Amino acid sequence: METALLNVRIIFQKNEAVTDGIGNHKNQWTDYYSCHATVSGESGSEKNVAANTLYDSDLAFTVRYCKALKDADSTKFRVVFNGELYNITFIDHMNYKNKCLKFRCRKVRR
C-alpha cells in the first residue's frame, strides 16, 4: 500500500452505552480512532420516495491495518469524513494479509 495515497483524515466513532448522572443508560457515539485513509468509489443513486428525491452516496475508505480496527463491526462503528457521517455497510479485510482494511460506507441522511 502506498502511503502517499492516504491523504484524508477520518474518524471512527463507536456506539457505546453510557450512564448519566441518575443512572439512565443511553446509546452515544464517541470518537474511537482517527487515521489517514484513501477515499474511493463515490457512486450515488437517486430514488423517488413519496414525492421526495433521495440521494444515496457510497464511499469506500481504505486504511492501514491496525489492532484498533481489526475487530471493527459494521453495527457498532461509523465514519466521520469532512463533517459528514457514514454508516459502514461492509468491511473488506483484503485477503486477510493484515496490510489494509477497506470500509464500504453509505452517507447518513439527517
Image: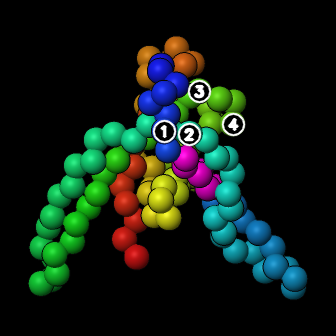
From what the image shows, is residue 58 above or below residue 109? Answer: above
**Residue at the image point whose x is 82% and y is 79% from the top:** 20
Residue 86 drawn above or below residue 10: below
Residue 68 tag number: 4
Q: Nearer the viewer, mark 1 or mark 3?
A: 1
Circle 1: residue type: Asn
Would you identify the image quadrant in which residue 67 lies?
top right
Residue type at tag 3: Tyr
Residue drawn at x 68%, y 62% is 30
Marks 2 and 4, Cα distance to the nearest angstrom? 14 Å
Evaluate if marks 4 and 3 touch, with contact meaning CB atoms under 8 Å apart: no
Measured Cα–Cα span from mark 3 to mark 2: 11 Å
Q: Which residues are magenta?
A: 9-14
- On the image, numbered disc 1 is attached to which residue? 7
Mark 2 touching mark 1, by CB under 8 A?
Answer: yes
Answer with mark 3 or mark 2, whichever residue precedes in sequence: 2
- Residue 89 at x, y = what percent? 40, 48
**Residue 6 seen in this snapshot:** yes
Q: Nearer the viewer, mark 2 or mark 4?
A: 2
Residue located beneath label 2 in the image: 36
Instruction: State which tag comes first along the sequence, 1 or 4.
Output: 1
Depth check: give the residue in front, 96 or 5. 5
The residue tagged 3 is 65
